[in-house]
Every structure is written in structure tokens, then in C-alpha cells.
Amino acid sequence: MRITRRLEFDAGHRIPNHSSQCRHLHGHRYAIEITLSGPVVATAGAADEGMVMDFSAVKAIAQQHVVEPWDHAFLAWRQDTAVVNFLAGIAGHKTVLFDAPPTAEHLAQTAFAILDRQYAGEYGGKLQLERVRLYETPNCWADALRGEQ
């Protein structure tokens, strides 16, 4: 059985080598969907009986490890020194650095790597992260899928 939980966050970024508008500083209302697979809990009387995982627990893990760190942050490529240095000059600014340009594709892969470790230990190791879908806009997204990392 597969389940999916969607969360949203706001963040800024830029793709410095892009040939169009995305090379400029800008922001998005991102959405992230986390898809997990596993058996339906069959323990009679359990709070999560009939579920793969309680959706609130799916949310809590994603919220703590991806959404909260990235929300209202500037997602920057470590090699984009002009922006990194500029942001470092703003006291208390929330900046998250990445080893590649913060494209939807790279953000989806990074979120998958972070969350895969977190969900793996849940429910006796019976859960598996299958997909992280990261929406940069309502019409544009990237999927990071198990086996394609």
C-alpha cells in the first residue's frame, strides 16, 4: 500500500547559470509530496490500525527534517559565492547551502536522501520511502524515486 502526504513552504533561490529569469533572486511557494509504502497496520486496537502510517507522523518527520529548515530560507548553491557572501552579511539570515544549484531536481533528490534515513526506522523498518515530488510551481515539479537516486 502507498500513502502520500503533501506539505508546503516558501523559499528563495536562484539558478546562477540559467539563461533566463531564474538566474535572478526570486522565490517560490514550494510543495513537497512524500510517498511511503508499507503494510497496513493490522494490530487490533492500535491507534494506527488500518493505516500504513498516521499522516500526522508522516508530516512531523518531513516538517522537522526538510520543511522547517527550508521554509523562509534562501536555498543557495555553495559555489554561488556572490550570493552566499551577500547573504552572510545579513545578520541572522536563514540560508541553506547545497552542493549543486538549487533546482527542483536537486532539491527533490536532497529531500529524498534526508527523508529516506528518517522514515527507514519507523514502524519496525517496514516502511519505505518511494517518492519525493517537489513542486517549484503548481505546473512544474521533479520526482526523486527509489532506485533512481
Image (spheres, rainbow, N blue to C red):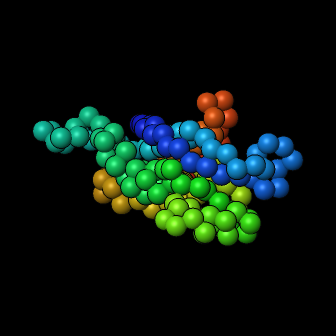
Tell me where residue 98 appears, x and y as whole percent: 63, 64
Is residue 134 shown above or below 100? above
Is residue 133 shown above or below 67? above
Say whether residue 129 is left or right of residue 28. Answer: left
Q: Residue at x 67, y 35 (%)?
A: 140
Residue 15 is at least partly visible in this image:
yes
Q: Residue at x 53, y 62 (%)?
A: 93
Query: For residue 55, what is the image quadrant?
Result: top left
Tell me where residue 9 appears, x and y as whole percent: 49, 43
Tell me where residue 52 appears, x and y as whole percent: 34, 41
In the foreground, 94 or 7: 94
Is residue 75 shown above or below 137? below
Say whether residue 64 is left or right of residue 94. Answer: left
Say whether residue 49 is left or right of residue 11. Answer: left
Tell me where residue 34 appears, x and y as whole percent: 48, 43
Query: For residue 30, what is the image quadrant?
Result: top right
In the foreground, 92 or 121: 92
Say whether residue 113 is left or right of residue 13. Answer: left
Q: Residue at x 61, y 69 (%)?
A: 89
Image quarter of the C terminus: bottom right
Query: For residue 76, what is the image quadrant?
Result: bottom right
Image quarter of the N terminus: top left
Q: How many marks?
A: 0
Residue at the far right in the pictured view? 19
Residue 99 is at least partly visible in this image:
no
Q: Residue at x 61, y 53 (%)?
A: 107
Residue at the far top in the pictured view? 139
